[in-house]
């Protein structure tokens, strides 16, 4: 991503509903599968500006990696120390090193030229029984200018993501779309943007209405709670929990 986008993320992701929701989902995953907490070795792949590492640190020793020097610079600015520059298709950690690997909004990106190869690398660096938590863009019908601005080239269906994870040896323990409540509005917005051939731009803006932000965060949180019991049939995003066998 462009440095301008990273700068927006650094300034907004602590309070912005979209990123706050991702951290809630990540925290729910960790609590559900590692209720005892602590003692884990965790790696955030494509750690961006580093805020998700704060969630991982509650469960053990957290490491981050990113291909972007700009992202690494923002992580250091946050005071994060265990950060390494690395490509997800050639991860600079040894095999069987981590209990948990996380990837939030990484595999859609054009720098991940071969997503199956990247998944194999994640499988390699996990310990036997280790888990991979992936959160990414869903449904090709939503592709639009926002994706182009973020250098996105793919959006996953549930069947495609499950098939690719299983292809490299993972056992998929849970998979679901998420952000179903926002799907209609995003679908209409993206289709209008495509028809009008709008200039690529981020839908994440530095200045946002606090009241609207709180309402959207509450809606996101309700879906996350629901995801413990059901698998949503559609959504703006998709997540999966996959275990190394």
Image (cartoon, helix red, strand yellow):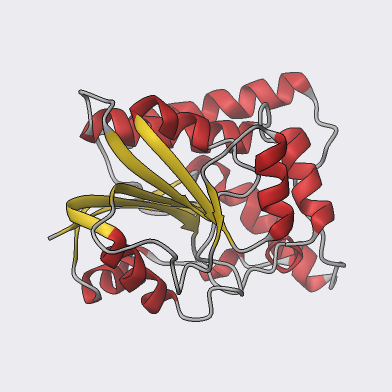
* Residue plotted at (53% across, 80% down): 113
Please indicate whether residue 169 sits to the left or right of residue 68 in the image.
Answer: left
**Between 128 and 95, the one nearer to me in the picture:** 95
Please indicate whether residue 172 sits to the left or right of residue 136 in the image.
Answer: left
Residue 134 location, x and y as percent? 40, 54
* Residue plotted at (80% across, 45% down): 7
* Residue plotted at (34% across, 50% down): 176
* Residue plotted at (59% across, 50% down): 184
Residue 46 location, x and y as percent? 54, 56
- 139 over 242 or under it: above or below: below
- 34 over 88 or under it: above or below: above
**Between 78 and 183, the one nearer to me in the picture:** 78
**Between 17 and 198, the one nearer to me in the picture:** 17
Count the marks: how many? 0
The quarter of the picture where residue 227 lies is: top left
Whether residue 174 can be seen here:
no
Query: Which quarter of the figure is the N terminus placed in?
Result: bottom right
Please indicate whether residue 28 sits to the left or right of residue 19 in the image.
Answer: left
The quarter of the picture where residue 97 lies is: bottom left
Query: Which quarter of the figure is the C terminus placed in?
Result: bottom left
Residue 47 location, x and y as percent? 55, 49
Residue 136 location, x and y as percent? 49, 56
């Amino acid at each position: 991503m462009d440095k301008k986008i990273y700068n927006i993320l650094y300034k907004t992701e602590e309070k912005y509903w979209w990123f706050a929701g991702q951290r809630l989902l990540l925290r729910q995953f960790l609590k559900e599968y590692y209720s005892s907490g602590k003692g884990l070795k965790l790696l955030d792949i494509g750690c961006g500006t580093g805020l998700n590492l704060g969630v991982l640190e509650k469960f053990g020793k957290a490491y981050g990696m990113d291909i972007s020097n700009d992202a690494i610079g923002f992580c250091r600015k946050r005071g994060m120390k265990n950060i390494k520059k690395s490509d997800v298709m050639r991860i600079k950690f040894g095999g069987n090193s981590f209990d948990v690997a996380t990837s939030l909004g990484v595999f859609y990106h054009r720098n991940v030229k071969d997503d199956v190869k990247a998944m194999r690398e994640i499988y390699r660096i996990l310990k036997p029984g280790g888990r991979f938590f992936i959160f990414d863009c869903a449904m090709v019908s939503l592709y639009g200018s926002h994706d182009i601005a973020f250098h996105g080239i793919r959006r996953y269906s549930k069947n495609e993501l499950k098939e690719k994870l299983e292809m490299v040896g993972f056992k998929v323990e849970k998979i679901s779309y998420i952000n179903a409540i926002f799907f209609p509005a995003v679908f209409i917005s993206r289709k209008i943007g495509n028809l009008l051939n709008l200039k690529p731009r981020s839908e994440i803006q530095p200045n946002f209405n606090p009241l609207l932000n709180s309402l959207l965060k509450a809606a996101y949180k309700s879906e996350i709670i629901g995801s413990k019991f059901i698998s949503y049939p559609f959504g703006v995003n998709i997540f999966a929990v996959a275990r190394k066998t």
